[in-house]
Image: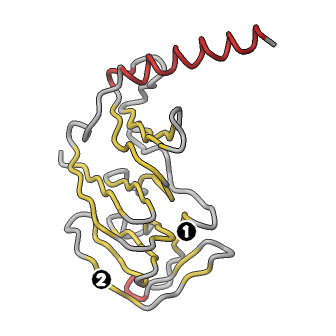
């Protein structure tokens, strides 16, 4: 048993050492904005209009244009069991949502960017942005800690990979590619 404790201590020390080498902030070539959203429950990206992010909260259902950050409220129409939402302005598209009841957004973009959630200091959680197929395990200084807080509901990329979001119960942090 003593050996297992020592192994765990050494592994933790190694991981924390790697995490401490990862810079914090917004990745180069990206812009970041945070919007306050009370009682956020679910988010999801449109597969057709990939800059459109659906947000479902205690304030209602809205569509956010990730390019302009314009928010448009719409009629609530979502299914928590099947984790889908509909929005009149997006036609018949079934939008997959993630949040309170499960689900998930893309953690990879087509151009090799990756998002990974870690929680070495739980309950605090961190999201690491890994560009161009880098891994924080092998090249931590090429990566970026883009989020360091509590209670992540969902995180991930849009289909086109030009946008990604980190959603908590009170905030939406939206990243958009600028080059």
Q: Secondary structure at mark 1?
A: strand
Vertical placement of 57 versus 136: above or below? below
Name of the residue lying farthest toward the front: 2
Choose mark 1 or mark 2, whichever is in front.
2
Give the image's coloring scheme. Answer: secondary structure
CB under 8 Å between discs 1 and 2 = no
Dot 1: few (<14), some (14–19), or many (≥20) neighbours within 10 Å? many
Q: Secondary structure at mark 2?
A: strand
Name of the residue lying farthest toward the bottom: 75
Residue 96: mark:
1
Q: Earlier in the sequence, mark 1 or mark 2?
A: 2
Residue 25 in picture, x, y percent from top left: 26, 38
Vertical placement of 140 versus 132: above or below? above
- Identity of the residue drawn at 40% across and 54% down: 166
- In the image, is 79 to the left or to the right of 65? right
Q: Which residue is mark 2?
A: 72
Residue 145 in picture, x, y percent from top left: 35, 35
């Amino acid at each position: 048993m003593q050996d297992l404790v020592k192994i765990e201590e050494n592994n933790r020390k190694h991981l924390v050492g790697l995490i401490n080498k990862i810079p914090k902030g917004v990745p180069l070539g990206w812009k970041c904005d945070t919007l306050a959203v009370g009682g956020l429950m679910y988010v999801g990206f449109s597969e057709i209009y990939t800059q459109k992010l659906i947000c479902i909260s205690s304030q209602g259902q809205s569509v956010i244009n990730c390019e302009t950050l314009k928010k448009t409220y719409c009629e609530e129409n979502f299914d928590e069991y099947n984790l889908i939402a509909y929005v009149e302005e997006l036609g018949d598209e079934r939008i997959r949502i993630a949040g309170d009841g499960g689900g998930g957004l893309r953690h990879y973009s087509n151009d090799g960017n990756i998002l990974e959630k870690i929680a070495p200091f739980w309950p605090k959680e961190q999201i690491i942005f890994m560009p161009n197929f880098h891994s924080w395990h092998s090249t931590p200084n090429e990566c970026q800690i883009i989020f360091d807080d509590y209670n992540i509901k969902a995180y991930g990329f849009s289909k086109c990979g030009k946008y990604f979001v980190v959603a908590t119960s009170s905030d939406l942090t939206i990243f958009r590619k600028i080059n």
